[in-house]
Every structure is written in C-alpha cells, then in structure tokens.
Amino acid sequence: MDSALCWVMMECPQGKILRESLEALSVGLSFQKQYNMETSVLWTGLLPEDSQLDYLASMGVKRILCLEEAGGRGDRDEALLFGLQELYLQNNPQYVFFGATPLSLFLAPRLAVLVDVGYVAKATYLRKIGDALSLTRPLMQGALSEVLRFIPPTRGLVSLYPRAFDVPGSPGDRPSEELTKEIHQSAVPVEGAGYREVIERTLEPAEALEVEDAEIVVAGGKGMQTEANFALLQELAKCLGGAVAASRIAVDLGWAPKERLVGQTGKKVFPELYIACGISGAHQHQAGMKEARHILAVNTDPQAPIFQIATWGILGDATEVVTQMIGRLRGMREEQGD
Ligand SMILES: Cc1cc2nc3c(=O)[nH]c(=O)nc-3n(C[C@H](O)[C@H](O)[C@H](O)COP(=O)(O)OP(=O)(O)OC[C@H]3O[C@@H](n4cnc5c(N)ncnc54)[C@H](O)[C@@H]3O)c2cc1C
C-alpha cells in the first residue's frame, strides 16, 4: 500500500508542547501505525529543543516542518495561516490533525477554505474504512452524535474534541527514527492588512479558567454544606492551577454559576484529574465527568455511587479534607520559596 501523508499541527508557545497538540500527535501516530501513513509534524512557536526532537524521533516521527514566525507588525495568526497554506499546497497532505487550541481552531477552518478541502471540527473518533475516513463528533452537548466522512478524494482537516484522545504513551524500546527538520517562514504580518487585529492578549487568573479547559477540575456538591465551604474549592483550584465545577444541586443553591455545572445538562469535561467533593455521583453528573483520566472522590458515605468510578476515594468530611489539602499545598509552595 502507498503511504500517504498525514500532518499533525503542534504548538509550543512557551517552550512547552501544549497538551492538545500531544492529543493530535497521538492520532497522527495511530494513523501511521494502523494505516501505513507517513506522519509529519508541523511545528509552531519556539523552535524545538533537542530533547523535543529526540522525543518526536523516539515516537516514530520522521519529518518536522517548523513554521517560524516572520517579524513584522500585524496579525501573526493570519501570517501563520498564509505560511501554512503555502506548505500545504507544496506537500498536499491527505489529512491534517489539529488539537483544540485557540490558534488551531482559528487556523484549521480558514486553511480548509484556502486550500479547498473539507474540515470537521470536534472529532471524538476517527477510523479509516477502505479509502474513506469516518469521523464521529458530538452535537448539542453530546445529546446527538454525528458520523461524517470526507467526499472522495477524501482529504481534509480535522480538529479534535479536547481531552477525547490520550497523549502518546512512552515509545517503549522501539529504535528512534531519523528525523528531518525543516525550517520555513510564515508570511510577514502586515499592519492594517487582513481582516482583524488582535488588540491585546492577557493571561487570565486561574479562577477565570473555563472548566472544560482545565487539566484539574475541583468540583463540589451539596456535601460542601454551605456557600462559604464551597468557596474553599476556589482556593484549592487556585493552588492546583485548576478550575471549579459544581453539581446541579450546588448550582441550584446558588453556590456556583450555571457555567460551572458539569453533567448531562451541563458541561462535559475530560481533565487529567477530577476532584469530586461532597458529590454523590448521580448518573446525570457522571455523564459530564466520568471520562476524566483520574477521579478523586471525597464523601462521607461509603455507598456513594461516585466511589464506583473513582480512581481514589477519601471517606470523610469534604470541607475538612479540602482545608487540609489547601494547607499542605501552601506549605509545599512556601518550602519551594514561591
Ligand atoms: C434530567 C436531569 C438532568 C440532570 N442533570 C444534571 C447535571 O447535568 N449535573 C448534575 O450534577 N446533576 C444533574 N441532575 C441532578 C442529579 O440527578 C443529582 O440530583 C445531582 O447531581 C446531585 O448533586 P449532589 O451530588 O451535589 O447532591 P446529592 O446527591 O445530595 O449528594 C450529596 C453527597 O454529599 C455527601 N456528603 C454529605 N455531607 C458530606 C460531607 N460533610 N462531606 C463529604 N460528603 C458529604 C453525601 O453522602 C452525598 O453523597 C439532573 C437531574 C435530572 C432529573
């Protein structure tokens, strides 16, 4: 079988590869393995360090195309887009996978229009059936699921649903590939050209982190007992760099805004760690969080359903446990001189 090209967009804005990009890499690598495709990495942000190149080579990547930002005032994202368009047209990859980052979600649909291929957003499952790529994605907060495919000649761009894919595991003892690194320039951003202008970018404080974007979610339910106790969850989330979420009852009691509701009628989250404090784990709540990689449940009732899906459980008063966790984390921070 001929090997076709598949690309993975990887972003490394502050020298650290974004988790969403690793999720996209994981999909690209599975295509390389299962469908005999050649997976290359399209890299943006700071140029890769040797250790990052070694990592990619050890995972089986043979080619990395670094798209370096050209200097100039103007919209850098649009300049990247035009650089990407040029690279795409020179190489014609069959598929390009994007993680669910703001930059990728800006680039992917626009690139699809520029290079005249299909685009599917928020894919949760991808599978090749013969020459066709079948993609599944949720609609209407997961109430509806849609299966799509690209019309032949079946090329397209795909952005992934956040946290729906694991990051790649360890390479094991497989020998590293010979990795070819190419450096390309994005288009020069021209001030006043293009359609939009980014006025300002600010790093938001932890409490502003959207619950679906957080790697760690600290969720509270009726078992937090009072609004004041519930407010402690914000403190814990801050110590962990996470976001606060709530059960339906906590929202109905006015302890948290409805944007923080997790579950069947709320948000679906896929964090690395979900800490459920005083939440029984009704199936409507589980519908929004059971895909978390790890779940820590704190509850006074050993029969609470949340313990059935928890990775770890603490039997005890949630307010007391949360207070102790905050104390320990603050102590650790002081020891580290932060
Ligand atoms: C159509 C429909 C849609 C729904 N959608 C959602 C949804 O999207 N999200 C959602 O969350 N719910 C939803 N619900 C409601 C859901 O069924 C539950 O009622 C709700 O999740 C319960 O919230 P809770 O766990 O905070 O409260 P409870 O079920 O009352 O549980 C409180 C828990 O706290 C424990 N507890 C008590 N005191 C302490 C203490 N001191 N320390 C530690 N633990 C303690 C108790 O043992 C208990 O397990 C929906 C319901 C329906 C009918």
Image (tube, grey):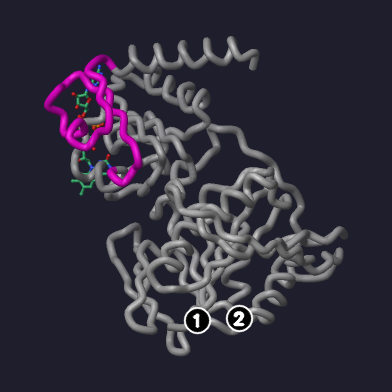
Q: Give me the residue at 63% from left, 43% from top.
A: 16
Do the residues bearing badges 2 and 1 touch, measured as CB atoms within 8 Å? yes
Residue nearest the observer in this picture, 32 or 100: 32
Mark linked to residue 92: 2
Side (left or right) of 64 relative to 285: right
Specify the amino acid type for callout 1: Arg
Query: What's the magenta region?
Result: 290-317
Specify the amino acid type for callout 2: Asn
Above or below: residue 268 compared with residue 42: above
Q: Would you say residue 302 sits in the magenta stretch? A: yes
Q: Quadrant of ligand 1?
A: top left
Residue of label 1: 155
Element type at mark 2: loop
Residue extending farthest to the bottom is 152
The residues tagged by marks 2 and 1 sit, at their Cα atoms, a distance apart of 9 Å
Above or below: residue 177 compared with residue 110: above
Above or below: residue 233 compared with residue 207: above
Q: Residues within 10 Å of mark 1 (few under 14, many from 20)?
A: many
Element type at mark 1: loop
Counting from the top left corner in percent of width and height, residue 165 is at 40, 54
Task: Please tell me in which quadrant of the rendered image residue 146 appears.
Answer: bottom left
Q: Is residue 105 visible?
A: no
